[in-house]
Image (cartoon, rainbow, N blue to C red):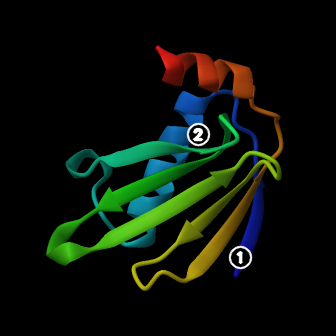
Amino acid sequence: MQEIDRAVESFDELHSFVHQTLCESENLLAEQFQTHCNSLRSKERVCAIEYNLRGPRSLRLAAIWAADQNTVYFYNARGERHLKVKITTRLSLEELEASTAA
């Protein structure tokens, strides 16, 4: 499994980065597919964000941003973890919770 570091300034930038990385992993055109995200909660607080991309021929890719570790884990079409990206800038959970509460 490959491990890299990446600076991300906002959750919108994180979403764009995850989308681009998922598309590149299977040689998909980014503008033809969407990545959907869901916040995962524990005790009413966001603890992670799950990203899903559905492609052609029932292809399904995923990534999870773990808030406590500030790391994104990428999973291939077989469900195997193939990439770990450490986010070097801390993202504000309060900003995320405010946007998901609205």
Q: Is residue 33 above or below residue 57?
A: above
Marks 2/1: CA–CA distance = 18 Å
Q: Residue at 37%, 72% (x, y): give it.
A: 26
Secondary structure beneath label 2: helix
Residue 81 percent across, percent down from the top left:
60, 78
The local crowd at label 1, few if under 14, some if 14 to 19, many if 20 or more residues have their Cα within 10 Å, is few
Give the mark toward the camera: 2 or 1. 2
Q: Amino acid at mark 1?
A: Gln
From the viewer's perspective, is 87 left or right of 72? right
Q: Quadrant of the N terminus?
A: bottom right
Q: Residue at 82%, 34% (x, y): give it.
A: 90
From the viewer's perspective, is 59 left or right of 73? left
Looking at the picture, tell me which residue is in the foreground, 7 or 37.
37
Q: How many marks?
A: 2
Of all residues shown, which one is farthest toward the left?
A: 57
Looking at the picture, tell me which residue is in the foreground, 17 or 51.
51
Q: Which residue is mark 1?
A: 2
Secondary structure beneath label 1: strand
On residue 14, the disc is: 2
The answer to whether marks 2 and 1 mark residues whose Cβ atoms lie closer than 8 Å is no
Residue 102 percent across, percent down from the top left:
46, 14
Q: Residue at 82%, 48% (x, y): give it.
A: 68
Looking at the picture, tell me which residue is in the foreground, 81 or 25.
81
Residue 36 percent across, percent down from the top left:
36, 46
On residue 94, the disc is: none
From the viewer's perspective, is 50 left or right of 30? right
Q: Is residue 54 above or below residue 91?
A: below
The local crowd at label 2, few if under 14, some if 14 to 19, many if 20 or more residues have their Cα within 10 Å, is some
Q: Amino acid at mark 2?
A: Leu
